[in-house]
Amino acid sequence: MTRKYFRYAASSLLGMVIGLTATTAAAADPGVTDTKIILGSVTPVSGPPSLLGKAHMAALRVWEQDVNARGGINGRKVEIRQDDDGYVPQRAVQGVKRLVDVEGIFGLIGTSGSAMLQAMLPYINEQGLPTINAMAVAAAHFTPPNKTVFVVGPTYCQELSSAMKYMVTSKKLQKEKFALVYQDDEFGSDVRCGYQKAIKDMGLNSVSEISFKRGTKDFSAEMLSLKQVGATFLASGGVVAEHSMLMKEAAKNQMPLTILAIHSAHLTPVQALAGAAGDGYFVADYVPPLTDLSVPGMAKFMGLAQKYLPADEQKLLNRYSITAYVGALLMEDAIRRCGKALTRACVVEKLETTKNFSTDGLASPISFGPNDRHSPSSVLVLRSDAKNSRFERVSDPIPVLD
């Protein structure tokens, strides 16, 4: 009787242990242990667009060290794993698969350019990865909504149309001859949307729209064409270096253009590459310049950067650092609100219920909803001061209207 009892008790205890272990294993999502959370980023840190990815990663390292110095998130330290996509869609897909299969990440806080994220979306959806995109925003990223992907910042369409309308109104440019040069992909399509919206809404005279292939380095024919049609206002839809090339060609052809570029021109290397032509162009963006320490969030971030980054890495910082930091803060808030019972599903639910999340002026308050995975931000118009290697704000925040 006693032996039977002990055999029964031992069997029951073993069954409980196995059952508890199975339950724990079933409840634990990849990238989470009792002591750490592994997050991933797929960004370009090689090739011409590496200016974007290196700046993005530098900011994520600042946040990683800061959050861990604060004790982590609910007692778990953060680890960030990165993959270089070289700004190539297929490499982005391979990168996110490696981060999931090899690194075992919990979620993504870096998603490269528009076309790269678009290529990754099917796999992100399949894996149910909580994902923050604050690098390159296009309508296709959230239309229709992707359940686990949350997008911060205006689309290129919203950004350019809002800034163009401000420029036309504030500088009385209604009678100018408008032109657009843009890349022929998903990114460029969204830029073109903003240009056409401003032209239509304000009844402006568009004299030319010219597309170019990814990797184009010679814009002499395009700018000569714009000179022949008498363009006086150029909307520049380049990625990074293309802005500089367009400006240099305009100067070479002695074209007195007012130039408005999308936010990828908010980089001091763009100023430098353009030479003398890089002074005085305008940029549409949704984060302030790094030098604007009157913004509480900027003063805090730059202080942390000086604390955690060596001097050579501080030189990598640019506007993509700020959007990366904003995205990281957003992910941190959602994870923290989940408490110790951390799952991907919980983070998605907390992100979905985010309302007016404050970034201390780095971007507009962030909100999402059950069928809304996009939180646009107010647009700023900046002016390039190439002589002093800086950008100056020339507008108050401009509300984005659909």
Image: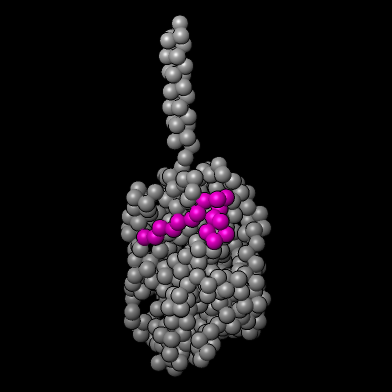
Residue 34 in view in this figure: yes
- Confirm whether the magenta stretch covers residue 82: yes
Residue 116 seen in this snapshot: no
Residue 189 location (% of width, % of height): 45, 65
Q: Is residue 232 above or below residue 102?
A: below
Q: Position of residue 392 (x, y in %)?
A: 59, 83
Seen from the viewer's position, the closer of residues 57 and 52 is: 57
Q: Quadrant of residue 253?
A: bottom left
Where is residue 394? Give x, y as percent.
63, 81
Q: Nearer the viewer, residue 96 or 248?
A: 96
Question: Looking at the image, which residue is at 64% across and 58% down?
Answer: 357
Q: Is residue 322 left or right of residue 41?
A: right
Q: Which residues lie in the magenta part?
A: 68-83
* Picture residue at 65% right of the left edge, 82% below the top: 170
Q: Nearer the viewer, residue 181 or 392?
A: 392
Residue at 42 percent across and 68 percent down: it is: 53
* Residue 219 image-quadrant placement: bottom left
Residue 179 in the image: above or below residue 29 = below
